[in-house]
Amino acid sequence: MTDHAQKIIEAFGASQHEFEIFMEGISGLFRKHPKISVGPFPVVHSVKSRIKSNDHLLDKIQRKQGEGREITSTNCFREITDFAGVRILHLSQNDFGKIKEVIDANNITVAFLF
Protein backbone atom coordinates (compact mmCIF):
# COMPACT_ATOMS: atom_id res chain seq x y z
CA MET A 1 0.00 0.00 0.00
CA THR A 2 1.34 3.41 -0.92
CA ASP A 3 1.72 6.25 1.57
CA HIS A 4 -0.87 8.13 -0.47
CA ALA A 5 -3.47 5.35 -0.06
CA GLN A 6 -2.57 4.95 3.61
CA LYS A 7 -3.34 8.66 4.23
CA ILE A 8 -6.76 8.26 2.59
CA ILE A 9 -7.54 5.20 4.71
CA GLU A 10 -6.43 7.08 7.83
CA ALA A 11 -8.69 10.04 6.88
CA PHE A 12 -11.62 7.62 6.57
CA GLY A 13 -10.69 5.97 9.87
CA ALA A 14 -10.72 9.35 11.61
CA SER A 15 -14.26 10.00 10.33
CA GLN A 16 -15.61 6.46 10.43
CA HIS A 17 -17.58 7.06 13.63
CA GLU A 18 -19.51 9.86 11.86
CA PHE A 19 -20.47 7.49 9.04
CA GLU A 20 -21.54 4.88 11.58
CA ILE A 21 -23.72 7.36 13.49
CA PHE A 22 -25.34 8.56 10.26
CA MET A 23 -25.86 4.97 9.05
CA GLU A 24 -27.47 3.97 12.35
CA GLY A 25 -29.82 6.96 12.13
CA ILE A 26 -30.93 6.11 8.61
CA SER A 27 -31.34 2.44 9.52
CA GLY A 28 -33.45 3.39 12.55
CA LEU A 29 -35.61 5.67 10.44
CA PHE A 30 -36.58 2.80 8.16
CA ARG A 31 -37.03 0.33 11.01
CA LYS A 32 -39.24 2.62 13.11
CA HIS A 33 -41.01 5.11 10.84
CA PRO A 34 -44.76 4.65 11.45
CA LYS A 35 -45.68 4.88 7.74
CA ILE A 36 -43.65 1.78 6.94
CA SER A 37 -43.06 -0.14 10.15
CA VAL A 38 -46.43 -0.57 11.86
CA GLY A 39 -49.31 -2.92 11.25
CA PRO A 40 -49.54 -6.64 10.92
CA PHE A 41 -47.51 -6.53 7.67
CA PRO A 42 -44.90 -3.75 7.79
CA VAL A 43 -43.72 -2.41 4.44
CA VAL A 44 -40.03 -2.87 5.27
CA HIS A 45 -39.02 -6.51 5.52
CA SER A 46 -35.48 -5.87 6.74
CA VAL A 47 -32.77 -3.24 6.96
CA LYS A 48 -29.08 -4.03 6.59
CA SER A 49 -26.14 -1.68 6.76
CA ARG A 50 -22.42 -1.73 6.20
CA ILE A 51 -19.28 0.39 6.43
CA LYS A 52 -16.72 0.05 3.64
CA SER A 53 -13.78 -2.06 4.78
CA ASN A 54 -10.23 -0.78 4.38
CA ASP A 55 -9.52 -3.51 1.80
CA HIS A 56 -12.51 -2.48 -0.32
CA LEU A 57 -11.59 1.18 0.10
CA LEU A 58 -8.07 0.45 -1.16
CA ASP A 59 -9.53 -1.41 -4.16
CA LYS A 60 -11.81 1.54 -4.93
CA ILE A 61 -8.94 4.04 -4.65
CA GLN A 62 -6.86 1.96 -7.05
CA ARG A 63 -9.76 1.62 -9.54
CA LYS A 64 -10.46 5.35 -9.54
CA GLN A 65 -6.77 6.18 -9.90
CA GLY A 66 -6.62 3.69 -12.78
CA GLU A 67 -9.37 5.75 -14.44
CA GLY A 68 -7.11 8.80 -14.16
CA ARG A 69 -8.87 10.37 -11.18
CA GLU A 70 -6.80 11.89 -8.43
CA ILE A 71 -7.94 10.73 -5.00
CA THR A 72 -6.36 12.42 -1.99
CA SER A 73 -7.02 12.51 1.73
CA THR A 74 -8.56 15.98 1.29
CA ASN A 75 -10.91 15.15 -1.62
CA CYS A 76 -11.71 11.49 -0.88
CA PHE A 77 -15.07 12.33 0.72
CA ARG A 78 -16.17 14.05 -2.50
CA GLU A 79 -14.71 11.45 -4.85
CA ILE A 80 -15.86 8.32 -3.01
CA THR A 81 -19.53 8.31 -2.13
CA ASP A 82 -20.17 4.89 -0.66
CA PHE A 83 -18.27 4.75 2.62
CA ALA A 84 -21.48 3.54 4.27
CA GLY A 85 -24.60 1.93 2.92
CA VAL A 86 -28.09 1.03 4.09
CA ARG A 87 -30.13 -1.60 2.26
CA ILE A 88 -33.90 -1.65 2.70
CA LEU A 89 -35.70 -4.79 1.59
CA HIS A 90 -39.42 -4.92 0.88
CA LEU A 91 -41.44 -7.82 -0.44
CA SER A 92 -43.95 -6.15 -2.71
CA GLN A 93 -43.23 -3.67 -5.49
CA ASN A 94 -46.47 -1.94 -4.52
CA ASP A 95 -44.88 -0.98 -1.19
CA PHE A 96 -42.08 1.02 -2.77
CA GLY A 97 -44.24 4.16 -2.98
CA LYS A 98 -44.56 4.29 0.82
CA ILE A 99 -40.81 3.88 1.25
CA LYS A 100 -40.19 6.61 -1.34
CA GLU A 101 -42.51 8.96 0.60
CA VAL A 102 -40.35 8.48 3.70
CA ILE A 103 -37.18 9.04 1.67
CA ASP A 104 -38.54 12.24 0.11
CA ALA A 105 -40.00 13.58 3.37
CA ASN A 106 -36.59 13.21 5.04
CA ASN A 107 -34.51 14.56 2.14
CA ILE A 108 -32.41 11.40 1.92
CA THR A 109 -30.10 10.98 -1.06
CA VAL A 110 -30.27 7.45 -2.35
CA ALA A 111 -29.01 5.14 -5.04
CA PHE A 112 -31.66 2.65 -6.03
CA LEU A 113 -30.55 -0.88 -6.80
CA PHE A 114 -33.02 -3.29 -8.30
Image (cartoon, helix red, strand yellow):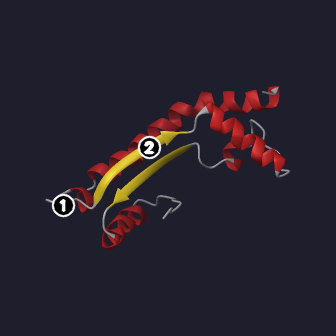
Quadrant in the picture for residue 56: top right
Sequence-wise, which precedes: disc 2 or disc 1?
Answer: 1
Q: Position of residue 65 (x, y in %)?
A: 81, 45
Q: In the rendered view, does 88 fall on the left or right side of 38?
A: right
- Toward the viewer: 8 or 56? 56
Q: What residue is disc 1 on? A: 41
Q: Secondary structure at mark 1?
A: loop
Q: What residue is disc 2 on? A: 49
Q: Secondary structure at mark 2?
A: strand
Marks 2 and 1 in Cβ contact (< 8 Å): no
- Toward the viewer: 17 or 65? 65
Label 2 packing within 10 angstroms: few (<14), some (14-19), many (20+): some
Specify the farthest residue to the right: 68
Specify the farthest residue to the left: 40
- Toward the viewer: 18 or 10? 10
Give the residue type at disc 2.
Answer: Ser
Image quarter in which the N terminus is found: top right
Q: Position of residue 54 (x, y in %)?
A: 63, 32
Q: Which mark is residue 100?
A: none
Residue at image position (70%, 39%) is 59
Q: In the rendered view, does 51 fall on the left or right side of 106?
A: right
Residue at image position (58%, 42%) is 83
Q: Position of residue 12 (x, y in %)?
A: 63, 33
Give the residue type at disc 1.
Answer: Phe
Q: Is residue 80 above or below residue 1?
A: below
Q: How many marks?
A: 2
Q: CA distance from mark 2 to mark 1?
A: 22 Å
Residue at image position (53%, 60%) is 111
Quadrant in the picture for residue 24: top left
Residue at image position (48%, 40%) is 50
Label 1 packing within 10 angstroms: few (<14), some (14-19), many (20+): few
